[in-house]
Amino acid sequence: MKKIILIVDDDRLTLSTAQNLLGDMYKVIAVNSGKQAYKYLERHTPDLILLDINMPEIGGFEVMEKLQADPRWKKIPVIFLTADRSSETEVECFRMGACDFITKPFEPQIMMSRIKSTLELDGYRKDLQRRLDEKTREMERITIQAIMTVANTVDAKDDYTKGHSMRVAAYSEMMAQRLGWSEEEVQNIYYVAMLHDVGKIGVPDAVLNKPFKLTDLEFRLIREHTTMGAEILKDFKMFPNVNAGAKYHHERYDGKGYPEGLKAESIPLVARIIALVDSYDAMTSNRVYRRRLSDDVVMQELEQGKGSQWDPDLVDIFMELIKEGALEKQWMREDDMASPIFDSEKIFGAKMGNESVLDAPLDYLTGVLSKRKGEHEIEAGLRSGGGCMMIIDLDHFKRINRDHGHLAGDYALKMTADVLRDVCGKDIVCRTGGDEFLYFAEGMRSRDAAIVKVNEILEAYTKKQQENDLLKETQLSIGISLSGVDGYEFDELYQRADKALYHVKQNEDIRYGFYQSTGAMRSPEQSKSDLETVVELIRQRNDLHGAFQIDYGEFAHIYEFISRISERNNQKTQLLLFTLFSSDGSDVRLERMEIAMQCMEQAICKSLRGVDVGTRYSSSQFLVVLMGTEKENIRVVTDRIIQNYFKLYGEKDITVSYDVADY
């Protein structure tokens, strides 16, 4: 598209001449007064303004002053047009903020050269500004994520403050909005409040979680979290007053608080707000010695403390929010929130109040939909128009937790969630497990469209890896299923995407794969290759995490232990792989395969001795270690297992074969 040049000059000959010179290369808009220029600028933004200095009513310098004063127009490059060749006029042009000036009458080549140079320089400036803005946003996002991680870490130290910092931040934000603060000030207090308890990092967990009366020493340790927090944050410059929120949020309006005993208006306003909402959250959170207080009781407490503990004007405003029910709309109660403790195995199914944490609509750590909410929305999407389902696995996640700590692992999960949110837009993204995400695109029914989306995800993740060294240790594996082609119900599509993911993870050279109905279940021929792979991995004693669906590192340790015992006792140790497959080669429904696998598991348990070891290898296979069994006797064991399987299963559609490791 042509660049737009606005020419402002009261001389019609000048306007006509400029239009003739520039019309082939640029879109030229000509007006003959400052007033007309303002009218045009109210609705349009040109790429360059050619502005005459000497005009009746409103001169060029006056127009320039107004342009510089308005943020909408300030960055539009301006070249002055003038017949005055004096050095004073030239100096004044640049002082006013012009990029250049052109003398009349125009010299065509000089005019074209200066306009071209000005537009090119402005293009470079805009590009640099765009890059700077992108870097700034990235730094802000990383900083904000670090703040949330720190806040979650602090809250996780105290069994009764899970989510406390985020609630206090949300309440503080609402108070700032009600007070009429600017958007920047509102955002600032949100993050100041998020970090108000950061000093608790230095307080022993035993003191924070003590259910009995604190000793004088313990109470002093608790009080020191304010000064400790201020010390931690003193050099943090991104948000103004961030250390004031940490240091003074336990000051009282009557001067009886700590650490400095400040009184009334001498307490920073951000700290007065945080002190109030901090107390509210403490009263409305469960404690070891009591349940949360009702709003009626809380308002009585606030009324009693107005003017003594808290700023009376702020209390009145805050009580209005309580009466309006605004706090309930803004933030979920503690009873509805998922725990921020990072070990997800400890919180699945845990109860807080009367509801399960699984009912929370968002995953607390990553901010994407929770497992239950995501599955519910995907089921609705399948009923509405079908689509594409992808299971996205973050490979080597446990290795990050092991080598760098759980905070680093949480950061990797958040980064992955950010990538999926950015790429997937309005599509459904939820977290289904520790390192696994589920993505669903309603209406996406073709492989070609799915491949385009997968490549977008992988490209965005690669870019994120280049920005963050931690993510370079990871990679994404994606299993894909399509409704209509691979099934219609959620469970069916999920199982088939999971099977596709399994095959992706078996092959280091590919990052994604579709469900293949003819190959999703392992055949007897394939199972022999599977067993050879397991044996080779055990022999090499490599890190087996990520290769299979269970922790095969543990299986390798068990196998090695049993092998050593067998060597000492001069006994043989054998590795068996049992594979279930369709009798006629047709596809098998998820429900039938799971029933068959359960029967197989029971058959193995009934047939093995106490010293033998068995575990699932895949959705249709079992691994078994036989200790002290000669190879010629294996047939007896396997026949017993297979006979028990058919007795328990009672059908003939899914049969079984086995392979023995050949040493």
Image (cartoon, rainbow, N blue to C red):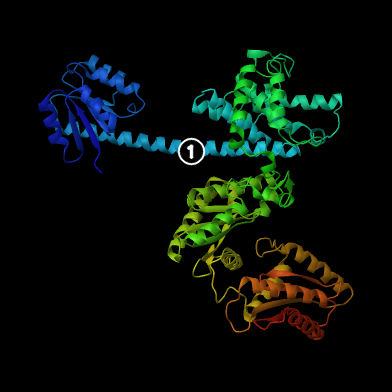
Residue 450 x %, y %: 47, 62
Closer to the camera, 230 or 22? 230
Residue 403 x %, y %: 70, 50
Which residue lies under the disc numbered 1? 135
Q: Is residue 167 above or below residue 616?
A: above
Q: In this view, does 35 lie to the left or right of 632?
A: left
Q: Is residue 90 visible?
A: no
Q: In this view, does 565 lie above or below 478?
A: below
Q: Is mark 1 on a helix, strand or loop?
A: helix
Closer to the camera, 478 or 18? 478
Closer to the camera, 592 or 110? 592
Total count of labels: 1
Residue 431 x %, y %: 60, 53
Which residue sits at x=68%, y=71%? 594
- Res 115 quadrant in image: top left
Q: In this view, does 406 lie above or below 286?
A: below
Q: Please, which residue is most extreme toward the right here?
A: 569
- Res 258 quadrant in image: top right
* Residues packed near mark 1 inside 10 Å, few (<14), some (14 to 19) or many (20 plus): few
Quadrant of the drawing holding the N terminus: top left
Closer to the camera, 626 or 218? 218
Q: Is residue 215 left or right of residue 444?
A: right
- Res 645 quadrant in image: bottom right
What's the amino acid at mark 1?
Lys
Which residue sits at x=70%, y=39%? 162
